[in-house]
Amino acid sequence: MKLMKSLLVAVLALIAGVATAQTPKKPSAPGKKPPQKAAQQYGCTSYMKAPAVTAAFDTSSGRGLADPYYLWDNGAVLRVKFLSGSSEMKFKVLSYAKEWEQFANVRFEFVESGDADIRVNLDNKGGHNSVIGQLATGVPQDVKTMNLDTTDFKTYESMHGTVMHEFGHALGLLHEHYSPLAGIPWNKELVYKELGQSQGWDKLTVDVNLFQQYSLTYTQGTSYDRKSIMHYPVLARWTTNGYSVPWNNYLSDGDKSLISALYPKGGARSTEKPRFFITDFTSMNFKESADKGGLLIYPSFRIKTQGAEGQVYFTVFFYDENGNPLMDNNDKYNISNVVATYKSFKFQAGKILTANKAAPDDFEMFIPYSELPVTPGTKIKMVFRAILVDGEELKWFFNSTPVNFSLKK
């Protein structure tokens, strides 16, 4: 129990760190009003919260930042479906994205119907963002996994850079300026001020988009690549020594080296991490049990295990009707004092397992009435989450929509 607590204590911070996507706007100079339109929008909102615990240094080849827990299988054929957009725009996007195929052992295949791994929304709002790597498998099929704001596609360079950047995220790449090797001397107060004025970002959003750092394991090597397609532009006035990074709209040599190492054409990856993904999450049924004195919960899903063996915690967190966590200090049914229940399993790679599919009650979770600090009739919510634990690494990989209910007992 103590080990589980020490590993999962960061779950709430991790989940809270995934901020709401906002439409980026290009920053304006101090004292000036933000421009109404920008030649190229600043940044994107495709990010994951940095791991709360670091692991051992990884000296694998390549440059840049990638999340090895969210990569697709090497040699994968990724089905891409557009949810909107003109035929001309779709053709351009896919033709640019396929440039990654020159260096990675993956292939993008356009489909017009059926299930798709990557679902692209093209519109004139919403900014640019993408789900990171194979986390897209946990997104319902009728929901986009990538958004491209076509108001930014005024030049070949801006469109090419944006498409390559977002499809880099879709392959599992992270923002390069998150590298612990970057050493960017940020003038943080000025950045907070300008991005607050120009984009409406609060301090937390700026921290997550610009200032967070991943552990060295995510560098995939020892180099920081300021020319990476995955690097945000850095304005000279945003640093204390005038350091700057321009718009990077083309793949760097480091990008090519990194993606070739992650998806090698000549054989298998040199190292594999556990890569577990929830698919076909259809429901989370529940019932009250007088005999057991509590709530019985039956989430229905499939889990696909890849890469290497790993430990998974299936959890259910509880909230009030306004989304505030229910708090308790019981050691058994809380995580960081938030009311929750969980089950843990160690899975080998290469399996597809189901919960409450073959039978409606073959995977049961339970929490006693005594651990839910609410009175009968109170409206509460519960959320199912799946969390991978690999040594000191803790990776969130599924988050359900809330289920609303009221306890009768």
Image (cartoon, rainbow, N blue to C red):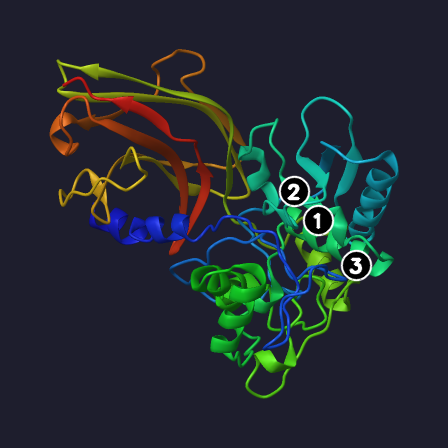
Distance between the alpha carbons at the discs numbered 1 and 3: 14 Å
Residue beneath label 2, please? 146
Residue beneath label 3, please? 158
Distance between the alpha carbons at the discs numbered 1 and 2: 9 Å
Instruction: Give the structural element (helix, strand or loop) at label 3.
Output: helix
Q: Quadrant of residue 405?
A: top left
Image: 44 above or below 76: below
Which label lies toward us, 1 or 2?
Answer: 2
Image: 95 above or below 196: above
Q: Residue at x 67, y 69 (%)?
A: 233
Mark 1 residue type: Phe
Is residue 390 visible in the rendered structure shown here? Answer: no
Instruction: Give the structural element (helix, strand or loop) at label 2.
Output: strand
Q: Are marks 3 and 2 in contact (CB under 8 Å)?
A: no
| Residue 137, position as x, y percentages in the image | 58, 34
Give 105 or 338, whichever is nearer the viewer: 338
